Image (tube, grey):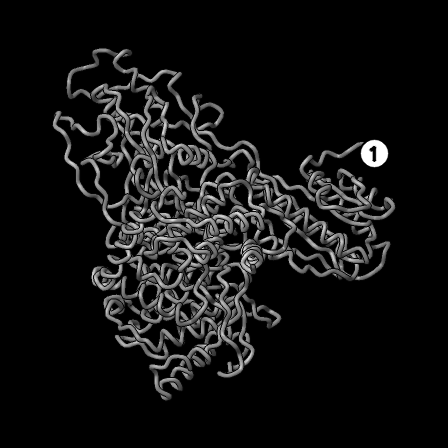
């Protein structure tokens, strides 16, 4: 596919970049929904993320990218009976393209093997390939309903269960779901919206200087992708290191009571449904602190990440004129007044 | 300028666009050609063919092309004869290095447009279907021919945005075409030169400022304009960008995309910095070029002045290129872009396929399509049992397929509906009616993700009916377009019903089921032609209503008068509409009525 556009070279779009980094540090947060108009660099960012993340250890040739320290049954030993080596691979970022059919998404009978040697073998699909990585769906609104149902199921359990064509297979499918969408194409189901941990809005850059810079960089990249990537390699490397460090740090970070209480207050003020919003808010704030190299979460961390964590969880009142952004601002202003 | 002068210019620009596209087809991406069949269009397409290397270099993309043919899929014959899944590439891959031509592009459905757009962005087709997994590189240009007549139809925004040139050939007479028919320049040299054209900072800045001045906010547009400027430099035999190139780019790329006109030349001190709030949906104010230019502290005063001049030149060119209606008003691109395009050319309802929803066991009778790979997969495990010793090694394998193995593709049966509200926006209770109608629209849209239904709203006020909300599924678009809906004036009932009829017709052509919902207090007082007069207004309204009935379109009439109006009942009868009286109009009630269907109730 060629050299991806470097993550650090993306102009502006800080909300989106932060959300993607957070999702990369703690996949349990649950993926990112990127909402916005055409041509705002959504797919560029996700592909760039792949180039940025530190490599992982995986069993050689394993279609599920399994971890050598906890391999999937049978994955550790190759066809020749010898234990398989482990090697480092880039974090997988798998595209779910338009027109994908169910058999390629969940996996199906390996037709070739069945017909030539009469062997019943499972041919893993995209969900297998995305395990321990990212699954990217461009234009979530256009995705067919039955595929959406499949994804919801798998994303909830972290496991792909295949019962078809005489096969009975189960394999881990833990991935960060990243979807992009254009609100002009229609609404998303609440169940699908809920699946995403964070939701960010992107817009074309508003200052002329920023727009010109976007064009300048795009142009330079297209003329010589390798040279362009080399220019940004150091910065990408540093960002990758920050992500690794944050991963190690984030589970031991202290969340003071004041922050816990404030999180509850914010969610209360907004009337978000259920506890998932609150949990996401806290997790994301913790990761934000970790990415910053700190060992305590502050109220500011909470405030900064609240819009991304909550904007898609607000109870819909169609008659309310104010957009979700404004409602969150209002709630934050109120709870932070004291 | 004289009419014929304008037409000559229009034609000249159209031919220039063809040449520039031919020089850099993959960077400029393509042309949206708004043209009905005719001599101008033929001449333009012929020129293009000559410039791009003849018929070999292009391929037609059929409007109702299937997933498989577009992206790639099973080679049926080869698969069945060899017993293995054999794939053939789709048209997107076949277009690699070529130019795709798409006629009636305004009817291209969303997902097809999106698939083509993605392939353009990625410079590859990503295939994940029916056992095949591949990424096949492809770079192509696209000519999308827009043959729509009415305003409001148009090529899908995802393609409009990506194709640099928007060429309009409407109204160009034969004599202009014949006059200006000198053979097009050979672009071979220009093509070679294109790669070597240098970057120029000041040109880029000036174009960015001009774009902002005209409310063209997409970065993509800027990138395309740059490519066009370069192509023009190459065409003129230069590797340095100059003013002229920027001016042409402004004219060809930015002009047709203008969403606003700057009032006067911007003054550096007056306007404040643009306030970014990151919300893509709100219209943005034009940035102030003068102010931004002053912020760049690495340019000296002379550079500033030069930049100003260059910007003004481009601005003037863009201004001249903004399309103009017959009455002289500028036609700006509104954010009221069209919804998903029309269905397949065939008008028969049976050809329309709903969305694919998976595969199930069944026989391909009654038009159902066989899912080959899934069928093979179902049959595969049984081969050993069914034909234990089939030939020796190397003989072609036959697959014994039984009836129970057959799998067919399922499509959504339920036709999606389109609810067309016609709201009386006149009189004292107008605001209330409008507000409740708006509320009902939003309620319907808020849960329409399940049904994928669309909603539209026509407001009757003053002399005519206004299509305030074109058919959409998007709640955010509805909110935006319905915000601050004004009322007042008379009730042009007949016009309202006719406008609804037009929408209903269009909806049917796209395979959707229309329902007209009329909210009124029965006080029609403006006739079809816009003149006042109660009796004529009512007569005209009744006539229009009869058309609704004659066309068999489902309708609901909601009477909002404080006491049930006799005329409303009469109108409902003429339309064969379900009549509901809601003197205390409320959005939720309207939503319930619409949801529970439009069977005419016994009165």
Residue A26 is left or right of residue B345, and the answer is left
Task: Read off the chain for label 1.
Answer: B
Residue B154 is left or right of residue A104, and the answer is right
Q: Could you tell me if residue A304 is visible in this image?
A: yes
* Residue B599 x, y percent position in the rendering: 72, 33
Q: Quadrant of residue B179?
A: bottom left
Q: Using the image, determine if residue A26 lies above or below residue A77.
A: below
| Residue bearing the label numbered 1 | B603
For this rendering, which residue is in front, B308 or B293?
Answer: B293
Q: Quadrant of residue B188?
A: bottom left
What is the quadrant of the C terminus of chain B in the image?
A: top right
* Residue A169 x, y percent position in the rendering: 32, 24
* Residue B213 x, y percent position in the rendering: 49, 74
Residue B50 is left or right of residue B515, and the answer is left
Secondary structure state at the residue bearing disc 1: loop
Residue drawn at (31%, 42%) of the image: A133
Q: Using the image, determine if residue B182 lies above or below residue B144.
A: below
* Residue B185 x, y percent position in the rendering: 31, 70
For this rendering, which residue is in front, B180 or B272?
Answer: B272
Residue drawn at (43%, 74%) of the image: B209
What is the quadrant of the N terminus of chain B in the image?
A: bottom right
Q: Could you tell me if residue B188 is visible in this image?
A: no
Q: In the current view of this chain or complex, which residue is farthest to the bottom? A: B302
Q: Using the image, determine if residue A240 lies above or below residue B9.
A: above
């Amino acid at each position: 596919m060629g050299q991806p556009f470097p993550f650090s070279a993306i102009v502006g779009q800080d909300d989106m970049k932060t959300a993607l980094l957070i999702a990369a540090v703690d996949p349990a947060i649950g993926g990112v929904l990127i909402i916005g108009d055409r041509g705002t660099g959504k797919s560029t960012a996700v592909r760039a993320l792949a180039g940025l993340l530190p490599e992982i250890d995986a069993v050689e040739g394993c279609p599920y990218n399994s971890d050598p320290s906890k391999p999937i049954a049978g994955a550790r030993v190759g066809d020749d009976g010898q234990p398989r080596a482990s090697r480092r691979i880039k974090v997988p970022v798998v595209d779910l393209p338009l027109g994908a059919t169910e058999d390629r998404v969940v996996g199906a009978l390996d037709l070739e093997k069945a017909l030539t040697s009469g062997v019943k073998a499972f041919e893993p699909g995209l969900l297998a390939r995305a395990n321990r990585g990212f699954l990217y769906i461009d234009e979530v609104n256009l995705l067919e309903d039955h595929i959406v149902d499949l994804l919801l199921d798998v994303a909830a359990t972290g496991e792909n269960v295949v019962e078809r064509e005489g096969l009975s297979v189960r394999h881990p499918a833990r991935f960060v779901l990243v979807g992009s969408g254009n609100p002009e194409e229609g609404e998303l189901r609440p169940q699908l919206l809920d699946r995403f941990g964070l939701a960010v809005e992107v817009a074309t850059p508003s200052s002329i200087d920023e727009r010109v810079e976007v064009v300048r960089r795009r142009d330079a990249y297209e003329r010589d992708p390798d040279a362009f990537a080399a220019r940004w390699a150091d910065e990408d490397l540093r960002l990758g290191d920050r992500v690794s460090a944050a991963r190690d740090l984030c589970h031991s970070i202290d969340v003071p009571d004041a922050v816990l209480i404030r999180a509850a207050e914010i969610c209360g003020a907004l009337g978000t449904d259920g506890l998932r919003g609150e949990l996401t808010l806290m997790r994301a704030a913790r990761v934000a602190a970790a990415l910053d190299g700190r060992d305590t979460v502050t109220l500011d961390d909470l405030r900064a990440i609240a819009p991304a964590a909550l904007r898609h969880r607000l109870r819909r009142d169609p008659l309310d004129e104010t957009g979700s952004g404004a409602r969150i601002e209002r709630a934050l202003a109120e709870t932070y007044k004291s | 300028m004289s009419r014929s002068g304008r037409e000559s210019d229009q034609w000249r620009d159209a031919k220039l666009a063809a040449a520039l596209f031919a020089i850099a087809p993959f960077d400029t991406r393509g042309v949206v050609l708004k043209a009905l069949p005719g001599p101008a269009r033929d001449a333009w397409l012929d020129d293009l063919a000559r410039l791009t290397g003849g018929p070999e270099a292009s391929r037609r993309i059929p409007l109702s092309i299937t997933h498989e043919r577009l992206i790639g899929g099973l080679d049926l014959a080869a698969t069945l004869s060899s017993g293995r899944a054999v794939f053939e590439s789709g048209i997107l891959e076949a277009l690699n290095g070529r130019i795709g031509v798409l006629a009636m592009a305004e009817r291209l459905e969303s997902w097809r447009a999106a698939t083509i757009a993605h392939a353009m962005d990625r410079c590859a087709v990503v295939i994940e279907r029916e056992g095949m997994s591949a990424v096949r590189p492809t770079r192509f240009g696209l000519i999308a021919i827009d043959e729509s007549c009415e305003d409001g139809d148009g090529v899908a925004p995802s393609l409009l945005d990506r194709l640099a040139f928007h060429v309009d050939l409407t109204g160009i007479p034969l004599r202009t075409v014949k006059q200006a028919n000198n053979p097009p320049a050979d672009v071979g040299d220009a093509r070679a030169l294109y790669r070597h054209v240098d970057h120029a900072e000041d040109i880029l800045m000036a174009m960015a400022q001009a774009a902002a001045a005209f409310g063209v906010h997409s970065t993509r547009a800027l990138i395309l304009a740059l490519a066009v400027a370069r192509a023009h430099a190459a065409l003129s035999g230069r590797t340095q960008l100059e003013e002229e190139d920027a001016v042409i780019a402004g004219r060809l790329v930015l002009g047709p995309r203008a969403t606003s006109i700057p009032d006067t030349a911007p003054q550096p001190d007056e306007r404040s910095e643009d306030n970014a709030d990151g919300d893509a949906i709100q219209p943005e104010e034009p940035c102030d070029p003068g102010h931004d230019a002053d912020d760049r502290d690495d340019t000296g005063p002379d550079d500033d002045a030069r930049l100003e001049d260059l910007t003004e030149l481009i601005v003037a060119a863009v201004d001249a290129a903004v399309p103009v209606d017959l009455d002289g008003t500028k036609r700006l691109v509104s954010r009221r872009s069209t919804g998903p395009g029309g269905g397949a050319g065939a008008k028969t309802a049976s050809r329309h396929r709903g969305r694919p929803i998976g595969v199930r066991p069944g026989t391909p009778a009654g038009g159902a399509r066989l899912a080959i790979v899934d069928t093979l997969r179902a049959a595969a495990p049984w081969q050993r049992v069914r034909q234990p010793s089939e030939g020796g090694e190397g003989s072609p394998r036959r697959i014994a397929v039984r009836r129970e193995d057959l799998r067919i593709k399922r499509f959504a049966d339920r036709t999606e509906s389109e609810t067309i509200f016609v709201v009386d926006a006149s009189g004292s209770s107008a605001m209330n009616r409008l507000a409740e109608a708006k509320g009902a629209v939003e309620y319907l849209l808020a849960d329409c993700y399940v049904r994928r239904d669309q909603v539209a709203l026509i407001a009757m006020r003053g002399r005519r009916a206004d299509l305030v909300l074109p058919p959409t599924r998007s709640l955010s678009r509805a909110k935006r377009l319905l915000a601050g809906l004004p009322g007042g004036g008379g009730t042009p009932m007949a016009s309202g019903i006719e406008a609804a009829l037009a929408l209903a017709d269009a909806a049917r052509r796209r395979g959707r089921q229309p329902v007209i919902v009329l909210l009124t207090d029965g006080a029609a007082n403006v006739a079809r032609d816009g003149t006042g007069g109660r009796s004529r207004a009512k007569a005209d309204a009744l006539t229009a209503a009869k058309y609704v009935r004659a066309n068999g379109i489902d309708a609901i009439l909601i009477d909002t008068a404080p006491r049930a109006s006799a005329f409303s009942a009469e109108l409902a009868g003429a339309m064969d509409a379900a009549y509901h009286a809601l003197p205390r109009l409320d959005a939720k009630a309207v939503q319930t009525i619409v949801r529970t269907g439009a069977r005419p109730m016994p009165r």
